[in-house]
Image: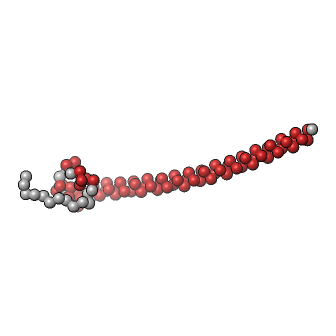
Amino acid sequence: MADNIENLVLEILRQLGGDITSLRNEIRHGFNRVEIRLGNVEQSLASIFGVVFRLKAGLRTPNLMAVTQSMGTIGNLKRDRVCNPCAPAKAKTGKS
């Protein structure tokens, strides 16, 4: 009877060990996916920061400063010019 109990305990321990190994592999695989996705988020964020930095740097260039001064301050620009700075400016009329 004692041998049967020992065999039963050993069998249960083997099953638990197999289950733990399976869970460990699933966790590793999930963690690897999270690392990959986090890397993608970091790359996207770095790209966004790069664009923002280039936009800020572009506001400090002399040519853009001259354009904005001739059109008025940035706060007084029409909404469509702020939203689409590449759109052609409307011709100014001589009337005040």
Color scheme of the displayed model: secondary structure
The N terminus, quarter of image: top right
Tell me if 59 is positioned left or right of 76 in this view: right
74 or 22, which is in the foreground? Answer: 22
Which residue ends up furthest to the right in the rendered image?
1
Q: Position of residue 9 (x, y in %)?
A: 83, 41
Tell me if 35 is positioned left or right of 70 in this view: right
Which residue ends up furthest to the left in the rendered image?
95
User: Quarter-wise, where is residue 88 in the image?
Assistant: bottom left
- 82 shown above or below 88: above
Q: Position of residue 72 (x, y in %)?
A: 17, 52
**Residue at the spot 56% in from the left edge and 51% down from the top edge:** 34
Q: Position of residue 94 (x, y in %)?
A: 7, 57
Q: Position of residue 56 (x, y in %)?
A: 31, 54
Q: Number of callouts in the render? A: 0
62 or 90, which is in the foreground? Answer: 90
**Residue at the spot 64% in from the left edge and 49% down from the top edge:** 27
Tell me if 26 is positioned left or right of 89 in this view: right
**Residue at the spot 46% in from the left edge and 56% down from the top edge:** 43
**Residue at the spot 42% in from the left edge and 57% down from the top edge:** 47
